[in-house]
Amino acid sequence: MAAVVQTDPPTRSACNPWRLSVAPMMDWTDSHCRVFHRLLTRRTRLYTEMVTTGALLHGDVARHLDFDTIEHPLALQLGGSEPADLAACVRLARRWGYDEVNLNCGCPSERVQRGAFGACLMAEPALVADCVRAMLDASDGLPVTVKHRIGIDRVEDYGFVRDFVGTLAEAGCRVFIVHARNAWLQGISPKENRELPPLRYELVHRLKREFAALTIVINGGVGDDDAIADQLRHVDGVMLGRRAYHEPWAMAAWDERFFGETGPAASREQVEAAWVAYLERLHAAGKPWPRAMRHALGLWNGTPGARRWRQVWSDHRLKLEPPRKVAAMAREARTRRVMPAAVD
């Protein structure tokens, strides 16, 4: 177990459900990924990939909404802009047992823009307010939250995001997850939108000062645990994305450091054993375990033998083998730092 750097004793804010969360990431944060993350942290809030209202209302609902009970607390992120459709999806989320429904007003991709939702909705705060009201009317107490940017295109006026938040707060929204970059809607890719627009944390901090009664969560570029602790001095919560995905073992320290939980934490070996047991259940059900294993390839990052461990688990020649057999080979490769003959 990695050493835990202790910060100030947790205050009542440690009970805030949005204190730490893992961002919704398309093609990454599926149910398998969330089960793996839950083996590392009990308290961190997890989010689904964005699901469009059309996919739920006209597609296979169970395929999009089913999840493992271990994943709680879990939020469903929706993409859409029709109040009635969003309300219907909130009712589905209640039926499935989600802990929150989040409206995506931050995704800048062209595909999302063609659907008239995502970051482009920030230009229509009155419409988003109607969506929020409809979702709240259907929620029966289920939290309805909004994830958004600090602005769109090259408009960098604080008043833009302040008025957006203010309008939605008047509609009843109480939790805002703010990506501290603008969304540039033309000319760059979604990946570049996570890197090129400058981070402006001070605008998110200002939102918290101006809207003290609201829950403000910051997202975008937050690095190590000390950076998380620094942000928590200004806002109510921090949402992390790619760092949590690529360096998952960092999450193993979060329950103690940021939520004040005590007691023995699981070792990497124990987490790996629990994960292999999950893969075995998939294999026994005839489901391809490599689709799940891809999310856990960073478990041993930064330790001797980690690269060989990843190579064994990634070997396509082993994809039909029982996970427990592959796990034994990977463990041998990591501890002895010698590749097994089967994958050499």
Image (cartoon, rainbow, N blue to C red):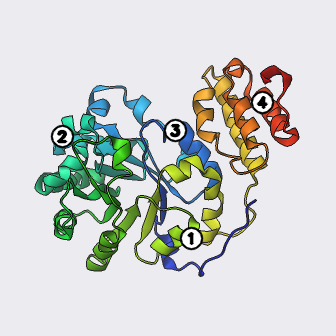
Q: Nearer the viewer, mark 4 or mark 1?
A: 1
* Residue linked to disc 2: 116
What's the residue type where badge 1 is placed?
Asp
Measured in 3D between alpha carbons, the distance from the residue under mark 2 to the one under mark 1, in whole angstroms, is 38 Å
Query: Relative to 259, does residue 338 appear above or below in the rendering?
Result: above
* Residue linked to disc 4: 324
- Secondary structure at numbered mark 4: helix
Query: Reading the chain from its start, which is encountered first: label 3 or label 4?
Result: 3
- Secondary structure at numbered mark 2: loop
- Secondary structure at numbered mark 3: helix
Query: Reading the chain from its start, which is encountered first: label 2 or label 3?
Result: 3
Query: Reading the chain from its start, which is encountered first: label 4 or label 1?
Result: 1
Q: Where is residue 328 in the image (x, y as percent from the top left)?
A: 82, 32
Out of 329 and 21, give the one closest to the viewer: 329
Tell me if label 3 and label 4 are in contact, CB under 8 Å.
no
Q: Which residue is located at x 62 percent, y 70 percent?
A: 257
Query: Reading the chain from its start, which is encountered first: label 4 or label 2?
Result: 2
* Residue linked to disc 1: 226
Q: Which residue is located at x 21 percent, y 39 percent?
A: 113
Q: Which residue is located at x 31 percent, y 33 percent?
A: 56
Measured in 3D between alpha carbons, the distance from the residue under mark 4 to the one under mark 1, in whole angstroms, is 37 Å
* Residue linked to disc 3: 31
Q: In this view, does 84 lie to the left or right of 324?
A: left
